[in-house]
Image (tube, rainbow, N blue to C red):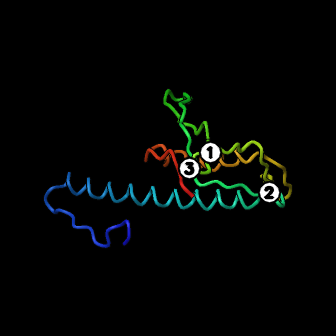
Amino acid sequence: MTKFESVLHLPVDDLSERRKILSEELNKVIVEQITNDIRAAITKALESLEDGVEIAVDRFDWEFHPESDDEGGTDWWVNYVTAYNGDEVVDLYEYEVEVLHWNGRDTYMESLEDVIREILTDNKEDLFDQNVTEIKL
């Protein structure tokens, strides 16, 4: 069975209820899309570990921390990324992955934790707005 309704039954006269139903469905779609995208990016990062290095990770969690922006608002940034294998914490700083430089030609080594944090940060607005603080692989 799918997570989504194949047909939404929307009230015609009650616009508040109509908006509520549409918002709930949109939120489900956003959460599903970002978690799928993040899972794929994390899986790719785990597969790009140095030759012969494998780690078992089944979930990640993180926190958000606020930072003031130039316009008097607040940006929320991903912080304290933790990886787990069952109940055991996996130290991601022990592992390095080869990353393509922004120029598209060169590569360099970066800690797996930094790579995962960057993946999450690329999606921080949706993650924060949808209150997603954990992803299971």
Q: Quadrant of residue 2?
A: bottom left
Q: Are marks 2 and 3 in contact (CB under 8 Å)?
A: no
* Above or below 130: residue 26: below
Looking at the rendered structure, the number of numbered marks drawn on it comes to 3
Q: Nearer the viewer, mark 1 or mark 2?
A: 1
| Residue ID at (64%, 53%) | 57
Q: In the rendering, which numbered label is found on residue 88?
A: 1
Q: CA distance from mark 1 to mark 3?
A: 26 Å
Q: Give the percent coordinates (x, y) of residue 16.
A: 20, 51
- Sooner in the amino-acid sequence: mark 1 or mark 3: 1
Q: Quadrant of residue 54?
A: bottom right
Q: Residues within 10 Å of mark 2 (few under 14, many from 20)?
A: few
From the viewer's perspective, is 97 left or right of 4?
A: right
Three-letter amino acid code at disc 3? Asn
Q: Nearer the viewer, residue 26 or 62?
A: 62
Q: SS of the residue at dot 3?
A: loop
Q: In the rendering, which numbered label is found on residue 20?
A: none
Q: In the rendering, which numbered label is found on residue 123?
A: 3
Three-letter amino acid code at disc 1? Glu
Q: Nearer the viewer, residue 32 or 82?
A: 82
Which residue in the protein does label 2 denote? Answer: 53
Q: CA distance from mark 2 to mark 3?
A: 27 Å
| Residue ID at (51%, 56%) | 34
Q: SS of the residue at dot 1?
A: strand
* Above or below 127: residue 137: below
Q: SS of the residue at dot 2?
A: loop
Three-letter amino acid code at disc 2? Val
From the viewer's perspective, is 35 left or right of 107?
A: left
Q: Nearer the viewer, mark 2 or mark 3?
A: 2
